[in-house]
Amino acid sequence: MEFLQDANRLIKKFEAAIANPVPVKGGTNLFAGVDLGTAYIVLAVVDQDGEPVAGAMRYAEVVKDGLLVDYVGALDIVRELKREIEAKLGTELSTAGTAYPPGTAEADRRSIRYVAEGAGFKVATVVDEPTVAGRVLGIRNGAVVDIGGGTTGIAVIQDGEVIYVADEPTGGTHFTLVIAGAYHISYADAEQLKTDPQKQQSLFPVVKPVMEKVASIIRRHIEQFQVDNLYLTGGASCFSGIEKVVEAYVGIPTWKPDNPFLVTPVGIALSAQRNWEV
Ligand SMILES: Nc1ncnc2c1ncn2[C@@H]1O[C@H](COP(=O)(O)OP(=O)(O)OP(=O)(O)O)[C@@H](O)[C@H]1O
Ligand SMILES: [Mg+2]
């Protein structure tokens, strides 16, 4: 998996910066990435060299299937995350990038931008999530699969360009629902169980059918293309062994970076720093 080395280094550094923000010198330009998801809102910050310096996240139910359903709620959380990071870094954040899932309509893209602007950011870029993920992973050809909270997004990339996108319901939420049902426990308890790496092996048989459902969505969308490799991103891809299930079902080599949950957020910050136009 040598080709994921750069991405893994970046993601590791971002992971560390979330726990311990990297002190920045006065006058350093910082770039934020605002990721509004169905399950999490994540704020990532990189410096002028594109190195991660801080990050913060909040569980939030302000987006449903890629659509912003609670503008005020989203605004409050982004403001709060911005203040939290500013306090830790001892400096103000001003420029941000933001992103939208595949297939988001123009009006909905605008409302995502308004959240970042309302929270006090100057918005430098509004990019599409799979393109960003593909660039972080350094992919020129293949399919990026973002298994998030509510949906699975698929982007087929050819010669560095996204040539096809799709986004369908089924994501981490469904994993949690299946666990809650099987063990007769609450959603919150099931979520906690699911995200405990120690428990994932015993939960595997319960969630495998949901993984196969995700795999069937992937297969259906990519069969019309020549796809040689699949790359998993998104929080639900963190579940141990999911890449093996997808690979077996779809029949295409499947890879995932060390922490698939953090790929898109750090990529959105990079898109602002590098002025990615997509
Ligand atoms: N370690 C983990 N193991 C398994 N699942 C995890 C882990 N960490 C996070 N998740 C799941 O990932 C999902 C959230 O992922 P992510 O933040 O990528 O989604 P989102 O961007 O909020 O949603 P969407 O992309 O659908 O709008 C949640 O369902 C969460 O339970
Ligand atoms: Mg997402």
Image (cartoon, rainbow, N blue to C red):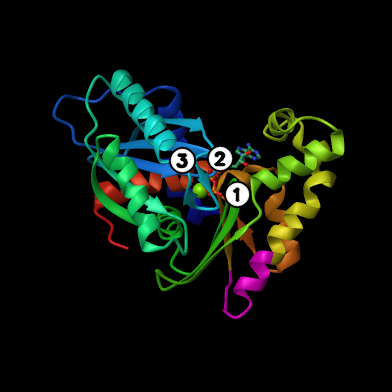
Q: Quadrant of residue 248?
A: bottom right
Residue 202, percent from left and from top:
83, 37
Q: Secondary structure at mark 1?
A: loop
Q: Quadrant of residue 146?
A: bottom right
Q: Are marks 2 and 1 in contact (CB under 8 Å)?
A: yes
- Camera-nearest residue between 47 and 153: 153
Q: Tell me: residue 207, above or below residue 128.
A: above
- Within 8 Å: ligand 1 and the Cβ of disc 1? yes
Q: Amino acid at mark 1?
A: Gly
Label 3: how many Cα within 10 Å (few below 14, some 14–19, many 20+) = few
**Between disc 2 and disc 1, whose residue precedes?**
2
- The residue at 69%/58% (across/down) is 214
Residue 50 visible in the current orientation: no
Q: Amino acid at mark 2?
A: Ala
- The residue at 63%/60% (across/down) is 254
- Within 8 Å: ligand 1 and the Cβ of disc 2? yes
The magenta segment = 217-228
Observer-side mark, 3 or 2, equals 3
Q: What residue did someone put label 2 on?
A: 39
- The residue at 63%/45% (across/down) is 236
Q: Secondary structure at mark 2?
A: loop
Q: Secondary structure at mark 3?
A: loop
Q: Tell me: residue 135, above or below residue 207.
A: below
Q: Disc number at residue 227? A: none
Q: Amino acid at mark 3?
A: Asp
Q: What residue did someone put label 3 on?
A: 70
- Within 8 Å: ligand 1 and the Cβ of disc 3? no
Label 2: how many Cα within 10 Å (few below 14, some 14–19, many 20+) = many
Label 1: how many Cα within 10 Å (few below 14, some 14–19, many 20+) = many
Q: What residue did someone put label 1 on?
A: 150
